[in-house]
Image (cartoon, rainbow, N blue to C red):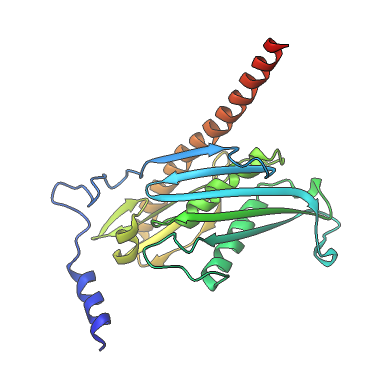
Amino acid sequence: MPGNLRKGIDYMADVKHMGKDGLRADGRRADEMRPLRIEAGVLENADGSAYLEWGSNKVIAAVYGPREAQPKYLQDPAKAIVQVNYNMAAFSSEERVRPGPNRRATEISKITAEALESVILTSHFPRASIDVYIEVLEADAGTRCAGLTAASVAVADAGIPMIDMVAACAAGKVDGQIVLDLGKKEDNFGQADMPLGIIPRSGEIVLLQMDGDMTREEFGKAMEMAMAACKRIHGLQQDALRSRYAVNFADMDDGEAEK
């Protein structure tokens, strides 16, 4: 066995994520999320945009459209198509990310587009394209959930009709315990990771993946924990949009006062 691989296996066996006090290595409880901040309308040149900080993750999302789908063979006469481009900046992680598309980015782009299609009223815009760009500026586990959460806010900021936003969060298993919102070491060396995205008002699941093994009971607990977190995240998404429009109305009032 190569020395580097043996070292990695030994590290996975030795690392402990949960302390005797029941707290994780970063001081969080098992059901506690990392700090989350969302800001809407951060890019002037996009139709809609959002910036998100989630722990050490830093993600920006931009939306353009609805606009005529190009090339024309992509056009659907019955509805708009949703195209997502997820990308990790070369400097986003400790090891330089190779520029250009890869299998992981392609997969995340696809599942994000499918999740957004479930909430956008695409039938209102036949032959159109709604283009979503997600750029991960700094990565610290959970970037697919962070990207989807930010993209939902950006779509709403663009004024595109939706039945609701999608909120996403991961739960998983480390040291035999179910925990919420895994950090980087927990994600890399834990026993399971389960990203979940829901439509909060209906509870409909639009994203569900799992890497690792959990029992039926553990899966149920992880699902319950992640869904509760998604509903809290939905409140933060709404707050970001309210803050955005509150600023706009304040600017309008100031302008009218000057007149």
Which quadrant holds residue 189? Answer: bottom left
The x and y percentages for residue 109 are: 59, 62
Q: Quadrant of residue 8?
A: bottom left
Relative to 95, 38 lies left or right? right
Q: Can residue 141 be seen in the rendering of this structure? A: yes
| Residue most extreme to the bottom | 1
Closer-to-camera residue (217/165): 165
What number of labels is visible?
A: 0
- In this rendering, does residue 198 appear at all? no
Q: Position of residue 184 (x, y in %)?
A: 34, 58
Task: Please state which of residues 38 and 100 is positioned toward the viewer in this rendering.
Answer: 100
Q: Residue at x 64, y 38 (%)?
A: 157
Residue 214 placement: quadrant: bottom left
Between 156 and 78, the one nearer to me in the picture: 156
Above or below, 189 against 132 in this view is below
Point 54% across, 66% down: residue: 105
The residue sitting at the left extreme is 20
Between 183 and 193, which is closer to the camera in this rendering? 183
Q: Is residue 243 above or below residue 94?
A: above
Q: Measured from the top left, where is residue 155 in percent x and y? A: 65, 44
Quadrant location, the C terminus: top right
Judge from the rendering whether residue 174 lies leftward or rightward of residue 54; answer left or right: left
Q: Position of residue 87 (x, y in %)?
A: 55, 61
58 on left or right of 118:
left
**Residue at (25%, 49%) from the top-left corner?**
26
Q: Quadrant of the N terminus?
A: bottom left
**Does 101 appear above or below 155?**
below
